[in-house]
Amino acid sequence: MKSVRNHLSLVIALFTIVFTMQIYLAVDRTVNAYENNLNENYSIVVVTAKKMEPDALSDLDPMIKNAQEVSTAEVIEQFQSQMKQRHIDLLKLSLPHFYALHLNRFPTPSEVNDLHKRLQKSSDITRVEDFAQNHDTLYKLLLLFKSVVIIFAIAIFAVTSLLVLKEMRIWQLQHNERMSIMAMFGAPVWLRSAILFRLSIVDALIASVLAISTFSYASYLKVGEEQLRTIGIDVLLFDPFNDSTLIIGVALSLSIVLATLIVIGHKEEH
Amino acid sequence: MDKVIVAQDLTLAYNTDESIISKANFSVTSGEFVFITGASGSGKSTLLKSFYGAIKPDRGSLIVGGVEINSISSSKRNFLRRHIGIVFQDYKLIREWTIEKNVMLPLLINGYAKDVSDVQVEKLLNHVKLSHKMGKYPPELSGGEQQRVAMARALAHNPILILADEPTGNLDNYSSRLIWNLLEGANTQLKATVLVVTHNIPEELGVEYKHFNIEHGTIYEIC
């Protein structure tokens, strides 16, 4: 019973760590997906006097992903009933060219500002509209969301680290006696520590299976994903193969580090 | 006859200012039964610990089973301990293991095959009259029974030297008698050298023995 309780303590501590890590990953993916959404909807508009190739505009700055000409046809169409064709043709000739520049990623306000300045230096560009005010509001919201997630992750990590440290101390006390007895009969270090490593690996695997099952079930029920889809964020919160591998890897590494620390911290009884 | 233990000007100390054993000269020959007596705190247990390399001499030299303890490395110490059987006053059994597994420990460390170990464990538990307790854990046994398990463990790998630190210190007369019989048997039948640290030498002992007494850090042989 005591042994089960001891196992449970480490399993719970490891489970909490991998659970928090997975939650952090899911939130991070959500933030990234949201950032991508924002980026897709955000573009800088430049005005040029003469027609330019979109590729030539893309080459102006490495931050620019692609450039797209904004058609003026719709605007001209509105005047079609009120103006003569001759005037419309004249208007077509005198209208400047508009291009929407899509960026590689969602920029920070200073990046927007710098890009604005760089674009204005080009002799072909007569005007740059970066919609800075709109961008800043969205960017601040995103920063707030990211900060909340980081604070949450740090708090959970701190609590679970304390749990693991406490568990490590208990294990150290528990296994010291056994390791000392084995040492008195000449057991080499690997043999003295073998049980410890076996137990910690078993506990890590139990914690991993529990975490993977929990997230797989949540993924099956589409918990979170449906709600996010309603606000326009389409994201995979749990990637069965990659995330399971990561969970097992982290749990095993942590438990092996834990067991190694116990073995290193072991002092032979005199 | 081979010398199992040779001490020359052996000085043992936990710190350099105060020595526990001072300039001791003695030897133990293979097959001997040796008692080390002395008052509490005289350094009996410290001396015993030096025999299995838990404490290194401060000065002088100590050779056990051909191994120089002064310069003993970790691997050499493990090697030495694999040829020694140790019995403690507080048994030092692994509580989470069954008594069979406890007895099997030296066999496991010495790399015995599983089937050989199983036979040896059964034989030993039979020898210490505990075969009916197989499958039990140390906390389920009485003190005397636990010490018999510890005796079986000490004998399991046919050691050249058996070290016993107050082996009957916590036991009643009946259990003490059983333990002395087992130590005598190890000496006479298995030809192991037995070295016992104790307060009192039992009155009836079926073997000839050598007796060292420790007083004020000095070791005297009592004839």
Image (cartoon, coloured by chain):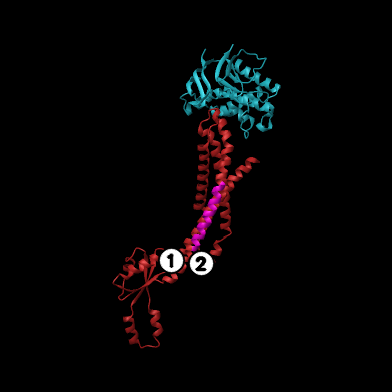
Chain colours: A red, B cyan
Q: How many marks?
A: 2
Residue B194 in the image, given as x and y percentages of width and height: 58, 18
Secondary structure found at label 1: helix
Do we see residue B82 in this rendering? no
Q: Which residue is mark 1?
A: A39
Amino acid type of the residue tagged 1 in the rendering: Asn
Question: Which residue is outermost to the left?
Answer: A123
Residue A11 in the image, given as x and y percentages of width and height: 58, 46
**First in sequence: mark 2 or mark 1?**
1
Q: Which residue is mark 2?
A: A232
Task: Find the magenta span and give its range.
Answer: A144-163
A214 falls in the magenta region? no
- Determine the residue positioned at 33% across, 78% down: A96
Where A151 falls versus B32 (above or below)? below
Secondary structure predominantly adopted by residues drawn in magenta: helix
Where A51 falls versus B68 (above or below)? below
Q: Quadrant of residue B113?
A: top right
Name the residue nearer the viewer: A49 or B31: B31
Q: Quadrant of residue B28?
A: top right
- Determine the residue positioned at 38% across, 79% down: A73
Report the side of B127 relative to A268 (left or right): right
Secondary structure found at label 2: loop
Q: Report the chain holding disc 1.
A: A
